[in-house]
Image: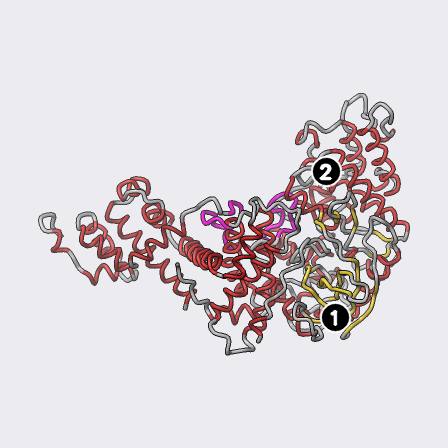
Amino acid sequence: MTTKDPQSGCNQRLLRGYLEELLSAQQQVQVEQHLCRCQACRTAISDSAADRQWWGNARDYLRGDDWDDDNRTGFSNPDVNRAPFDAIDQHDGSEEDNGAGWPSAVAPSQLVDWLDPTDDPRMLGRFGGYEIVGLIGQGGMGIVLKGFEPALNRYVAIKVLSPLLASSGAARKRFAREAKATAAVLHDNVIPIHRVDESNDLPFLVMPYVPGDSLQKRLDAEGSLDLVAILRIGEQVAAGLAAAHSHGLVHRDIKPANILMERGVERVRLTDFGLARAADDGSLTRTGVIAGTPQYMSPEQARGEAIDARSDLFSLGSVLYTMSTGRLPFRAETPYGILLRIIESRPRPMRELAPALPAWWETLVARLHEKRPEDRLASAAEVAEVLRGCLAHVEQPTAAPLPDVCRVDPRSGSAPRFPAWTRPARYQRAFLALGLLLALAVPAAWIIRWATGQPPTEAVELPPVNSPPALAKKGAKETAGEPKPEASPWDGPATELTRLLEDGSEFESRAHLLWDPPSLTDTTPAISPPPVTPEKEPAR
Amino acid sequence: MSRLPETSNSLLLKVRDPANVDAWREFAAIYRPAVYRLARRQGLQDADAEDLAQRVLVSVADALQTWEKDDNRGTFRAWLLRIARNAIINALTRRPPDAALGGTGVTDQLAAEQATGSPIRDLIEDEHRRAVFRWAAAAVRADLHESTWMAFQLTAVEGRSIEEAAAETGKSIGSVYAARSRVMRRLRAKVMEWEA
């Protein structure tokens, strides 16, 4: 260790010990000091750590290049292992993003077990008389398969109640009601139902397979849309909603991912009435579960109150806002924060984000974003009519006057003022907490049942069908007691809720699952080419 | 041609168990970026590459279920390569004709490769190994002092001089040498852990 003779300090054992992290602090300093001078030991420690090829690989592979996905997979991103459902609202408007985590991937593989065998080597199997081509996606209630109907030579989307849920009476009931309700709605802007049936004891419904993308995908790709496109899409969504509302059906989950855009034609179809239920069906809504994607929820949904058709109009307002600006109207770090904003705050004026938008458009969307349902436009039919009028005006400004409701308030020159009905924020938070309590309690019961292998109970409304069991078990551990089958949401663990509200991260990961069970893709036939047919070859 | 590491059997057992989400995450953390980059290298846009990566994961997840049932199928590595390659090629060639591929003749090229086999296979292996390295690096980095990691990053990855790295990290020259070798050793161990 003298400067005169650097070699005298060379000690292979110390170098190895350093690499293996076995040395005392003092010995480590000794090695580092020695390496300041001794070239031989510098080489020795490098070689001892790994050979030349490893060093080369590290250099080549860890260096970033043009092919990296800056958002997610880039090496420099410390979140590389983070699953997307750990963070809601990770980036604007793409809560459907499944990213690297995609924990539900394993569930559909079980699906193959209950498919019937097929003679066609290109097919996965048979189900309910259809040749199954592949898996389209997974939603809150089940699995969506792409099937082929040989007799009619057409492709169909088959929504099958998840096998996990098929054992639950409540889930079956709800699935049947969903199917029945949707089948009753015949409208160009609503995906029709061909058939409702059961096979191998699994209830399923059959819809046409529609090649195209969801509005979500389009927004992801394009950001915001131009006003004409927004009006066309909005008008059709409103028309589809009007048809559903006329059957007493509230969609409850209007969001871009549930708005399907047919390829090549300007036709928009509403889909996934997965959370819809007959508005007058009190028996199951009483549980007060908050169902729906938080970002597009209405204030009354966020508070866990009774909702009606006008709730969908608020959600439609949020969709219009997102299409106009490329951003979600209500954004926050946590689901709780989002709900709070939905209840308490006005979205940032659209024209601050997209100055090219006309003032009357701001006015109109604000009419849908009114906090009190009675302040909104009265019905989806009216919204559709107004949007049609707006479209005519935009296309022929001189010939077609703006609909009256779009008139800009001449005094302010912008959207009307927020009505002064607002309760003190304190109360609102209390309401919100109640809503959350309701939202958590019942799914928590579900999770516990599910994690402990017991069949779900009647009280369950929003089964986290794809929820990762690891989380589920955690939830089971942390949630107090074993809820009785008929447990009221009020029996839920209030202190647990308080803790969760304080601990954002934990709450976030769980709440996201409850509200928006991760799906593979859109729960609707949104993928244009069929999913990859799983490799059959190795099975031979 | 770089070698594709043999995938850890124990991990795959865990992946096949639907209860083990963490294992799946780890698995997806490695395979998904590999497929994504592969797609980008084939000229696909970001959103399309994302989409493709997802579809490949779907088919692999489906296929994992069947793997165990037949022991006479060669190594898992070879099998997975075949799955991934076919899934990628299928996904790329089945794209609708009006979709922009961002390059001409990609489909033809892939179809040709499906017949002959080799270049895309090399690409797949390369990207897989890259993904394993990055996964391992992220894990190693998380366990270390940032300055220790940077001693490695600056010199071994970015090719900066030891002196520069020393100045930037506030370490002595000897300490940079020591730190980067320690990181390398951990990295190698982590990669080999996956291969084991």
Could you tell me the amino acid type at mark 1? Phe
What element does badge 2 sit on?
A: helix
Name the spot of residue A462 as percent of width and height, x first. 73, 60
Q: Residue at 48% of width from left, 70% of height from top?
A: B76
Q: Between disc 2 and disc 1, whose residue precedes? A: 1
What element does badge 1 sit on?
A: strand
Label 2 crowding class (10 Å Cα cut-off): few <14, some 14-19, many 20+?
many
Which residue bears the numbered disc 2?
A321
Q: Magenta region: which residues? A: A69-97
Judge whether residue A174 is colored magenta. Answer: no
Could you tell me the amino acid type at mark 2? Tyr
Which residue bears the numbered disc 1?
A127
Depth order, front residue of A320/B43: B43
Label 1 crowding class (10 Å Cα cut-off): few <14, some 14-19, many 20+?
many
Depth order, front residue of A394/A38: A394
Depth order, front residue of A173/B1: B1
Judge whether residue A70 is colored magenta. Answer: yes
Magenta span: chief secondary structure: loop
Q: Residue at 66% of width from left, 46% of height from top?
A: B98
- B44 sits left or right of B149 in the view: right
- Please identify the quarter of the rendering in which residue A221 is found: top right
